[in-house]
Amino acid sequence: MPADIRSTYPKTEETFSLGTKDPYEALLLVRKAAARVDERFAAHRHGQARPSAPVIAELTRSQLARIEELYYSHLLDEDEQVRLEAFYEDGEPLPSTPVPSFDEYTAQATEFGSDARHMLARGKGDDFYRQEVEEVLTWDGLDIRLHEQSPSWKLAIRAIQSSIVRAQEAISSRNRGDVVVTPQVTLAPASAPGQGAGVLASVVRDDWIAEKARSTWVAKTKHEHSVWSQHFLDLVGDRPVGSYGKADGRAFKLALQKLPPNWVKHQALRHLTFREASEKSAELGLPSMSDSNINKIIGFVAAFWNWAAENYDEVTGNPFERLKIKVRGHARDDRDPFSPVQLTAIFNAPIYRGCLSERHWSQPGSLVLRDSGRYWVPLISLYSGARMGEIIQLRVDDVSREGGVLHFSLVDEGEDQRLKTSTSRRRIPIHPTLLELGLEKLIERRKAEGAVRLFPDLPMGEDGYYSSPFSKYFGRFLKASGADAAKTSFHSFRHSFEDACRNVDVPFEVMNALQGHGESGMAKRYGKGYVLQHLDKWVRQIRYDGLDLSHLVPMDQP
């Protein structure tokens, strides 16, 4: 163990098996293994160097100017990306996530700029601006640790506000059709080159998987990312992590486009390597997997490169940037909302009208499963827009009342709770229809029973997700109830909720807040801070014309 890292390295020695009994092969393998160990030592030194960087007391004028220019460039680049995706117009197919209309976006930009002007004129700031400064200070070209009590925080906040004011003026010009070029800010090296040079991509990948598995990944997520990132390295080769580029990303994408879905189960392919399977598929003329599935796989590997770029100076870009296939027609996650006929069929199924038993839920009988998650999860999704997993993992104490508004808190604080993204954390007022159907009484019953989960009858799958077994059940339920149709699934409840929001003119930002869609920049600023009463006002207006649920109202309900 090198003397300079002996006190901080987590091991006293590195031991490993070469996996061969051939002495000649071992001689070759040991050289590669020794190089990997040296790379681990170098990565450890690099990691130790960052936290020990000095905390500075104040920012210089040039640093403040750089903060302003970096953030200004960031805002215009963000605006450019929004325009490249195009604004939503009435009559167009609905996109996979809510996209603002031109008028909505213009209003957001104006509000964003007006807030910054207001704060700048009065010398004020709030948590939003402080958080933006904290983020910018970590960007390449700055990488600054500023003392918590530094007077420069106020100056940096003003620099951010100035950027927003300037950007809003530029965005207004773009809104008029004027050409405003996004400035390209040259990034100075964050640290001296060579500190982590030559680290193999496989070593970095192993560290990425280990870090993610300790925090946010469950077994299924780890498996998907591990398998596909390994296929990428198998195809293009294991090289120093800073040597990859767009050509490698394109090669992987082209190989994916030749493969059929579930290729590892295909008789002619399952014993082949990734490269061999791709070539064999093309030779056999097998139908390729869908574009959306290709994009999903690209996302798995692109996530690795995003992490590598954040952790290694020599990684200057993502080989998969903008390589995803543009799916025609904005297919809204390839799912449609449920039609009124489908909704009527769903909520008149034996589970809601009377079934034979819990086990024989598809056969008519006298048992209404009012205590079951199978009864409530679809109803809650229809009237809240929440995802399947978000509802199933609800705990009893995730339902509370504030300011007279009974609401769900969608969080990931429990060991068995997880959300799609950090922006999925939110509060959703409970729709009056759910209360009329007896949901509050169910909650009180669960409390009296001392239950932890609101729906304890719905088990977690082997992959660590509550949604996995329920998703399989719901597919069978749709067929049994006669509501099965192409391009509809449980996720269609979210699209139905979105349509219901649009039908009563729920503002775009409120709809995003209710559905947990991620926002950034001006939308993040404009949409944050909604009080429950404001959300409740809009939730109460949501309705489904033609859907009669009167048969679900308990007889003892007033």
Image: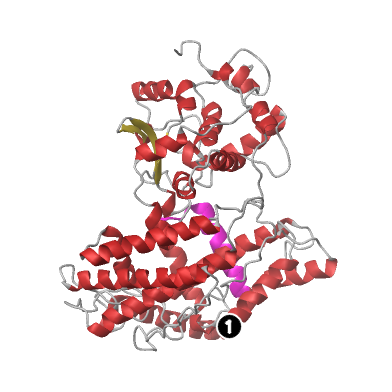
Q: Residues within 10 Å of mark 1 (few under 14, many from 20)?
A: few
Can you name the residue that lies furthest to the bottom here?
193
Residue 533: x and y in percent read: 35, 37
Give the side of residue 545 with respect to residue 176, left or right.
right
Residue 115: x and y in percent read: 32, 60
Check if residue 227 falls in the magenta segment.
yes
Give the side of residue 240 with respect to residue 422, left or right.
right
- Judging depth in this view, the residue of 493 and 75 nearest the camera is 75
- Judging depth in this view, the residue of 192 and 198 nearest the camera is 192
Q: Residue at x 44, y 49 (%)?
A: 424
Residue position marked by numbered label 1 in the rendering: 25
Residue 355: x and y in percent read: 63, 18
Q: How is the image coloured?
A: secondary structure
Which element carries disc 1, helix, strand or loop?
helix
Residue 238: x and y in percent read: 56, 79
- Amino acid marked by disc 1: Glu
- The magenta stretch is 214-234
- Prevailing secondary structure of the magenta residues: helix
Q: In which quarter of the image is the C terminus?
A: top left
